[in-house]
Image (tube, grey):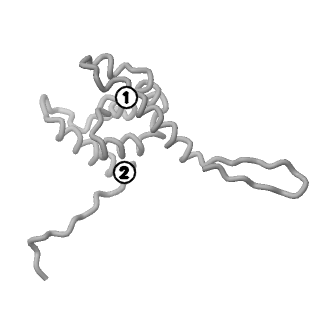
Amino acid sequence: MPETALRAGTPSLVFYDEQEVLKAGFHRLAERWKQETKFSSSATEVLAHPAYEAIIREGTCLLPYILADLELTGAYWFLALQRITGEDPLSGRTSCTYDEQMQAWLRWGRENGYLAPAKKTANPDRHA
């Protein structure tokens, strides 16, 4: 949300929270990518979509939002994450499941400070 600062005798200035602007821009692009590719069966079309490419070009500043979206929606962010970071948390593995890829990237995000630690759930079998 913009914050307006007023001083006597000076025009008003609008200041934007950079993180909020980045977050809003990411969500706009991600929603466009998801909506415009949701019926596509072509991996090339999905991963070469202009909105997906724009997110990749923004680079590391969007990593917290990409990882949060991955955790929340399970959207296919693996290629974007790999291209932005140059990392492959499953390097050396020749095959893995979608869930294994997702969990590896979420773990990488937590270990590198881009994603908050996972919330611990109470063990219902544990008795005091």
Question: Residue 6, labelled with which disc?
Answer: none
Say above or below: 78 vs 50: below
Left/right placement of residue 17 relative to residue 63 reads: right
Q: Nearer the viewer, residue 91 or 34?
A: 34
Inspect the image, locate mark 2, and give the three-letter code of the amino acid beneath it.
Answer: Leu
Q: Position of residue 94 (x, y in %)?
A: 13, 28
Q: Residue furthest left?
A: 125
Q: Residue furthest bottom?
A: 128
Left/right placement of residue 93 relative to residue 82 reads: left
Left/right placement of residue 115 relative to residue 125 reads: right
For marks 2 and 1 on the same chain, the one whose residue lies earlier in the sequence: 1
Say above or below: 15 vs 94: below
Of marks 2 and 1, the one in the foreground: 1
Say above or below: 68 vs 54: below
Q: Which image quadrant is residue 116 in? A: bottom left
Inspect the image, locate mark 1, and give the three-letter code of the amino acid beneath it.
Answer: Gln
The residue wearing badge 1 is 35
Q: Quadrant of the C terminus?
A: bottom left
Question: Residue 115, labelled with which disc?
Answer: 2
